[in-house]
Amino acid sequence: ETTPKQPTAKPPQQPKKTATPTATNQLTELQAKMKKTLSGGRFRMINEQLYTTTSDIAVDLFLKEPETFDIYHEGFRAQVESWPSNPVDHYIKTLSALTPSKSAKSGQQKPIVIVDMGCGEAALAKSIMSLNTTDTKRFMVHSFDLASPNEFVVACDIRNVPLKDEEADVVVFSLSLMGTNFLDFIKEAWRILKTGGNLKIAEVVSRFPSVNKFIEALVALGFKLTSKNTSNKMFVFFEFVKLAKAPEVKRKEAKDDDEKPLLTPCLYRKR
């Protein structure tokens, strides 16, 4: 008799690997969206603090929480992307065109001393200083802000910067009159500017209840308006020159209060 063949046993089948559900991808997108929302919320909170407190409180905040600077500027960069133009680019272009004068005594070319108050990540200094060569030093740029993200920036309260009296040819405030004591920043600019030196200010249009009142305050602090550019829909550009110190009684006329603010906070809305 013939023994019937036993069926050959098949090896156990490995379960087929199925593609991970699209929920994983959706989760990644959700996480990214949540992160962006949280970052945007932190940026708006920090931004409001900077506009509604004095500069010494802001300095203390950045000392206690160093990551605050990076969070703020990440959010700020996101805002800049939606702007038709950036005031810093305007100042890079106009200041780059300046020609240094020569010393009356030595005949040597003297570099133009520029001070960027509230400089952020020092885009102005990086661009302007790159124009210097080993043979010719056209510019010297001092950059000050609440924290120092790179070698160009000195961390300090910009109402009291580490420069001598009448050391600067140009002082720039590009969207940086943020503290409630911003007039102290203007007084410091007057101190460090040479007589006849230039003060350049760019600010958001919506911050001015009265542009004329703002100008009057700076005149009281010893400046003369030389130009005002309101052609940009988002920003106003001012040019002032430093005069001799105004009498103290006149300087006291430059004041800012809650009822009649010279500048209102620039607060970003949640999108």
Image (cartoon, rainbow, N blue to C red):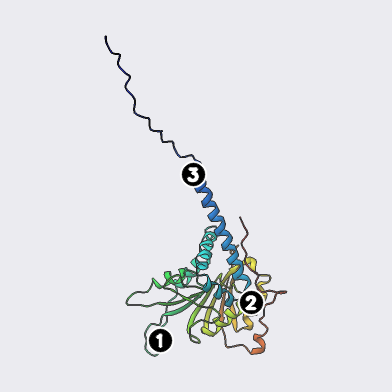
Relative vertical location of residue 252 with respect to residue 7 in this rendering, above or below: below
Residue at 58% across / 66% down in the picture?
Answer: 46
Instruction: Tell me where residue 52 appears, x and y as whole percent.
Output: 63, 71
N-term mark: 2 or 1: 1
State the separation of the CA atoms marked 3 and 1: 68 Å
Disc 1 residue type (three-letter): Ser
- Taking the image as shown, residue 131 lies to the left or right of residue 224, namely left
Q: Which residue is mark 3?
A: 24
Q: Quadrant of the image for the N terminus?
A: top left
Dots 3, 1 in contact, CB < 8 A: no
Does any portion of residue 83 appear in the rendered image?
A: no
Does any portion of residue 181 appear in the rendered image?
A: yes
Residue farthest toward the top in the current orientation of the protein: 1
Q: Which residue is mark 2?
A: 215
N-term mark: 3 or 1: 3
Q: Which residue is mark 1?
A: 103
Instruction: Tell me where residue 138 appears, x and y as whole percent.
Output: 40, 77
Kind of element beneath mark 1: loop
Query: As rendered, which of 197 and 192 lies closer to the eye?
Result: 192
